[in-house]
Amino acid sequence: SILGLNDDSILEYLRIRKMIPNQEGSMVKPSNLYHADVELFRIVFGNAPDKLLSASFKGNSDSIQNLQKIGVNTSVDAKNFLKCAEYIAEQVKWTAELENDSTINLRVPALVALNYLYNNFSSLSFNDEQWACLELIEFVPVVPVMANGQRHKCCPMPPSGFGTLKNICRPEYRDISWTQLPIIDYNVIPRGDITRKYPHIGTPTPEHVLKHLKQISMKLDELVDRKDVYRIVKMIYGILDRTARNSDSTIGRWLKKAGTIFLNINEGEDPFDRKNWKAYSQLKFGATKQENDFIKEILQPYPELLKAAGVKNVRLECLPEPEDKQTNRFLTGILNLLSENPDVHDTVFDVKGEKFYANKYVLAANGGMFKKFLSSTHFKGSTPSDPAVHEISEMDPRSFEVFLSYLYGNMLNVSISSKWNVVEEESERVQLYLDLLWAANFYELIDLRDIVECRLSRYLTRTNVKIIKEYADKYEGKQLAKVCANYMKTNCQD
């Protein structure tokens, strides 16, 4: 054989000419031939003898060495691995067009090629251009998501049964993206050095996950088993929340356009009820449990996701709380009065049938209407044995007890905590302050009214703002009435 002459000029002559035989006996250029002793080449090109080097060279190491010098593919490198992948993809496309099951036979060479890639990735040494090309070649076997024995209609399974490294999903991410990405065959899941250099292979992007969530929200009963809903939705929200927390990406724009993707329920509520799926505009931070846009248990752990989507806060304008001067003023007044009068009860307040006892001089020390009581005929002659009775129907007895403690010199917070050890509902606290607003207005206690207006401004919700504004208008709470009006204008337009 002339190959055995080791003449460089002869080898160079052969390099560019069709003078090397393939297994069909035809003469072809060396660079188009693959040595069948290499398992990858033998399996990939097993149905293409025109691409395999003639068997006549088998066992002739000197000839094989020279064949390698002139371009025959006698070992695997990045360049000819790409050729193998492209050949598989060409065969996949051709057989898919025949609309038969021939592509099944191509899974074996594809599996062999991918396992070779994973096992020898570092030694293949792909450059960036080569890798970018390989990622887009459709030679990766994928498997369908099944439903009732058939491929699920929402599964993006390529007709050929093959996908690309750039557009596949690892089985462990199936639940969060299977409507967007084909699932890679379990036999060729990426592993080893390739996953360390390209960890994104088989990992869905946040956009894939979000689009899958949108599909779930629209076709929940078709896509998810009832027992898996909470697990899958929480997994997806967790991924999107971390994306929103760690990135300034476009996820916010995607979320705003995604529609009703937020499952707003507590544990035990029905995720298959359509009204429980909300758009971002139907949720508000700071809403109360009684309001429709209150953020419930399932969504509460994901604030960054909700913020990125555009969920807004309920706007709350609180008045600055004035200094509470009641204690010093009262002590000064009571010391002056009690230095001349005994500390006895000569006044009775009948509050809806419940009686409270007080001293008229202590009451008068608070000023306002109480001071006028001293000169009134009804109270002037009252004694412990014949007390003056004052009936009140506008307050709850518990509220009056707090009010009386305040009149006896305690600051309002102390009066509330000492008389109301437990306030079970926020609505009860609101009613207490409404009662105190009436009392402050009726008995002309301006400082108390200022404090109560401030406190009520903190408890405004869309559920109670109307009743609070009615009290403010009726009982001279002008600052509070203005805050209520602003709150209603901002938050109660729907």
Image (tube, rainbow, N blue to C red):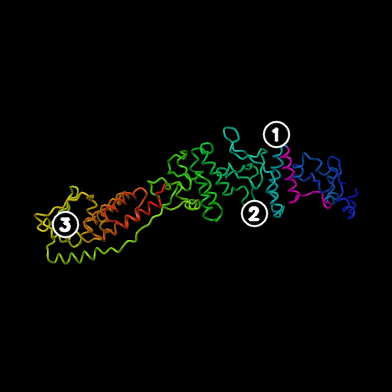
Q: Amino acid at mark 1?
A: Glu
Where residue 114 sits in the image (x, y, percent)? Answer: 69, 45
Residue for point 62% across, 47% down: 202
Callout 2–callout 1 Cβ contact below 8 Å:
no
* Badge 2 or badge 3: first in the primary sequence: 2
Q: Nearer the viewer, residue 67 or 390?
A: 390
Answer left or right for 273 relative to 187.
Answer: left
Q: Amino acid at mark 2?
A: Lys
Q: Tag 1's secondary structure? A: loop
Query: Which callout, 2 or 3, points to the residue nearer the camera?
Result: 3
Q: CA distance from mark 2 to mark 1?
A: 37 Å
Q: Tag 3's secondary structure? A: strand
User: How dense is the environment of label 2, judged by Cα within 10 Å: few (below 14), some, or many (20 and up)?
Assistant: few
Q: Nearer the viewer, residue 295 or 465?
A: 465
Residue for point 57% across, 32% down: 148
Check disc 3 and report the residue beneath it.
Answer: 358
Q: Tag 2's secondary structure? A: helix
Q: Is residue 69 magenta?
A: yes
Q: Is residue 255 magenta?
A: no
Q: Which residues fall within the magenta stretch?
A: 68-94
Check disc 1 and report the residue beneath it.
Answer: 99
Which mark identifies residue 303?
none
Check disc 2 and report the residue beneath it.
Answer: 197
